[in-house]
Image: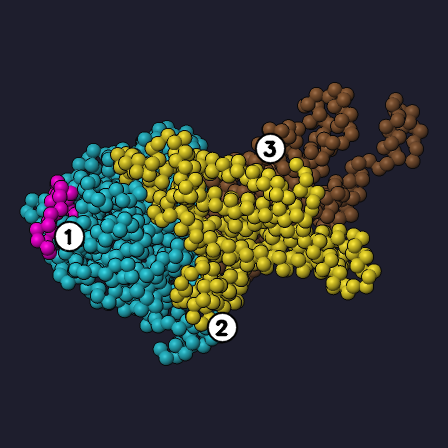
Amino acid sequence: MFSFIARRLGLLIPSFFGITLLTFALIRLIPGDPVEVMMGERRVDPEMHAQAMERLGLNKPLAQQYLDYVGKLAQGDLGESLRTRESVWHEFLALFPATLELAMAALLFAGIVGLLAGVIAALKRGSLFDHGVMGISLAGYSMPIFWWGLILIMFFSVGLGWTPVSGRIDLLYDIEPTTGFMLIDTLLSDEEGAFKDALMHLILPAIVLGTIPLAVIARMTRSSMLEVLREDYIRTARAKGLSPARVVFVHGLRNALIPVLTVVGLQVGTLLGGAVLTETIFSWPGIGKWLIEAIGARDYPVVQNGILLIACLVILVNFVVDILYGLANPRIRHQR
Amino acid sequence: MTNPLAKTAAVDAAPLDQSLLYPSPYKEFWHAFSRNKGAVAGLLFMCLIVFCALFAPWVAPHNPSEQYRDFLLTPPVWLEGGQWQFLLGTDELGRDLLSRLIQGSRLSLLIGLSSVMISLIPGVLLGLLAGFFPRLLGPSIMRLMDVMLALPSLLLAVAIVAILGPGLINTVIAIAIVSLPAYVRLTRAAVMGELNRDYVTAARLAGARLPRLMFVTVLPNCMAPLIVQATLSFSSAILDAAALGFLGLGVQPPTPEWGTMLASARDYIERAWWVVSLPGLTILLSVLAINLMGDGLRDALDPKLKNAA
Amino acid sequence: MKQSTLQAALAAILLSAAAPLMAKPLVVCTEASPEGFDIVQYTTAVTADAAAETLFNRLVDFKPGTTEVQPALAERWEVSPDGLTYTFHLRSGVRFHTTDYFTPTRDLNADDVLWSFQRQLDPAHPWHDKTSIGFPYFESMGFQHLLKSVEKLDPHTVAFHLTRPEAPFLRDLAMAFTSIYSAEYADQLLKAGTTAELNSKPVGTGPFIFQRYNKDAQVRYRPNPDYFRGKPPSDALIFAITPDNNVRLQKLRANECQVALYPKPDDIPGIKADARLKVAEMEALTTGYISLNTEHRYLSDVRVRRAINLAFDREHHVEQLFGKGNALLAVTPYPPTLMGYNSQNRNPPRDLDQARALLKEAGVPEGTVLTLFTRNGGGPTNPNPRLSAEMLQADLAQVGLKVDIRVMEWAEMLRRAKAGEADMVSAGWAGDNGDPDNFLTPLLSCAAAKNGENYARWCNPRFQVLIDHARETADPDQRAALYVQALAVYDEAKPWINMAHPKVFTALRENVEGYVINPMTNNNFATTRVK
């Protein structure tokens, strides 16, 4: 087991270097440099431009810049944003909880609804409910989510006034960002009603972001459940006279969950970095928007290290899923 | 079922016999496919879209770029103020929405098709290489794919479009690059599965060279999951193109691309819901149709995968 | 009044989000995150609003709602007869902000003024290299060449020595990049080695004191009790960062904010119709235009440029883009409220036949392709560049010119437009000191043609001489006469398609008082309150 984990960890090192190289190259391939962007419509003196580039260390040869970058990384230094002069790590820490909170809420929503719908559809295979769930989940899977977000806002926020339009909380509440998770921070603060307000703000974005994972989870649960229900041990459990609920949820679902987990692991990347559209529509102050803006501003350190951080997270999550999968399934452990 | 005429006509009758005893593979495929009603519905809808795309200039009632400046934001015909002249209403410049949607189908299909082709071919090639050279080349290809998979795909696409500049071809390239890893992984997995089979060993012993082994012996047996993946990425290409268009990085105006139409109409959502809702609905329905077809294809081509999501 | 409070209370209960237990703060929906608070490092309007207008003051500033200069930190000033020396007498008893991170021990004095200018001017100043890219505004205004020295005459008197007479100088000193910082606070940071905090923990003399900033979410301020013009009336000022203009309006309707900046022109009638809302509007110092590259094979011919101007359906274009009555048709590069506006300039009425004839005369073949560069997002000078480009494309198609629209990301467009790759550029400009020179020199001078900022790449010696001369002329009437002549030259040459001077709008809740809209599109809330 230990060697299995060690081998998998070893595989991560080249990936890590690959990511640094890729992001380093990507952002520099984009035409234009940070100084030009910051000057905007205004005049750029060639002399001033050269000075600024020198100050930023961007006049050095690329290979040198890359080595500097990796060297700094090795010391745990992620650099500072060229635009705001704030350390990239701090900016990440300030914005990441918002994305994580949204992603977790979306996953929670998708997980609960998706699992339930999938299990029931599997149990009532071929019924109207089954067809309905499968149809709806396929539609969810086909949804252009930016459009979906706009439509939900128009209907629930503007039309019915049930949910707030955008943002994380009504700004009349002055919430100290202790943890960065609005739901927790509002509970820690003594402002009445703030928690509820934060929750109301979270509902629509979570639904929008959770739509595609929901579809995937429902479909996966259904098919994996169908497979499990055919297995001998389920028949045995039934024959033993265990209650149907116990058979389904304890014996069936637990085993059906393994492939579902793998799929969820694959969705994490989409949820963290792919929340760009949802964050844009709901003015959600998360990292997706941060990175898109940084690409626009050619803020090299932010793009490089922001993407690196997300990529590492995604790799880490998949790594953990891998290990869990390996634990559950010895056959995989011994594959090369 | 035996037909003496056919028998006499054929010089080499033995394989023909087989095909007479079993239904032809196409027939078998159609039989399996048509059992899935959703898939058939998807196919019909797709036929409609393909028809519109092929014959857009004749099907569309108006020139999609013609600006009727006296008819700005005319509502669809069933609403008050609607005009029979503009069945689905007009957009913010007085252009006929139906004609633009029809013209847009060309573009979306083109983007979907070409990005699938552009990622499928190198993807399969890299996958074959990775499968056939498991020592050094394979793992390095796979590490590269892991790296690409770890980057959020939309961000990667945005960065690529930023590098290449916006435009139709660059959008296609960006989407193709983003969907590359899926093909590589899939092909490699399929190849690894096939390599241990007896028929491959037999071909090897018979002295088949590497290219023949790769493309003639192994590849055709890996096609089923690839075809399914191609349909899936066809639909996600349409979604990605729309998302890029929505972020303002899509094709150039006045080309009517669905996502771009939606994005530029967003400002009018409160006054004229149809300019936002109809392109979005069109995207949803087409992608749904393709996914339904994909489901049907998977069931028909690859019963093993039937239960995979 | 009473009834509306009752209604509001009822509504709050009905909407079930219990009303927060705070007195009357002012929430402003702004359009983007400020880049930082060390204002001299940045050039964007949003950063200027969040720092220069709230936290800082300058020696002089603009009288609210006008382009007139009024005393601020300087009580009065004298200009030497040769126009080379400006002497400022500072107001006494001005306090810097007291915050968690800084307690001032002295009032504002000449050292603070010196620090604020020397930092940008003097390469040997300990703070000069403590920014990432330098001092973009200071340098793009050419201050490093204009200022000979800044001199402290006594603790409350400062003299500026210029290298040449510069008529707009006083106005320049009202601009954000001349904000006055606390030298004492800077010393404290320098000693502690935390110079980056000047950008994240600002201290100034302005009407509001910095409290908190959450990127992409909010900036919070509290009123400055010692503000020299009197404590601002609102209990707190909150900038709710809301990039989407539809959402800003929706939040305003829901009373999640009381002021929404930059509403879409398209929404203005709807806001006016809503009894709970009102609109502040003003003819702003902005211009939207399309430059014609005068180095292009065909566009170098003035007949072709005239033909394009003749084919352009200006009235329809502006009305469709901005809405009826929301923008003034542009005739010159700057709006008529500024000095030296030439009322003789005219846009020719649309005449397709004449346009075709001119093109034929100039030998432009049918179907000639012209590229048009435009950005992918809207701004105050052009709310929907894509739409605008498509309309121009349709207009020019009628005279046989094909327009190839290239929508690109802003940074990319600027770079390529400056490099002269575009035949036409859809661009805009917001004047920031109310001086005509602030439009003509950056946008149409020969120097700008060389560095690319003049997208038309138009360099006309006659025009250049006139604006150079005007710039050194102190007498307003003489200056105005020179500008009238310069604009006549411009009118003849037609390096641009004049489009519009859009009005600037701010949407407010009906119960907001004391907000003054500014022609320079800056926003100041020192006197604003919610009734």
User: Residue pushed farthest left?
Assistant: C81
Q: Are marks 2 and 1 in contact (CB under 8 Å)?
A: no
Q: Secondary structure at mark 3?
A: helix
Image point (49%, 54%), residue name: A99
Secondary structure under tag 2 reads loop
Question: What residue sits right under mark 3 in the picture?
Answer: B139
Provide the residue span drawn in magenta: C147-171
Apparent side of residue C510 relative to residue B72 in the rendered image (left or right): left
Disc 3 and disc 2 on one polypeptide chain: no
Q: Which chain is yellow?
A: A
The amino acid on which the numbered mark 3 sits, given as a three-letter code, is: Pro
Residue under label 1 = C111
The residue beneath circle 2 is C16
Q: Using the rendered image, report if marks 2 and 1 lie on a common chain.
A: yes
Q: Quadrant of the N terminus of chain C?
A: bottom left
- Chain letter behind tag 1: C
Amino acid type at mark 2: Ser
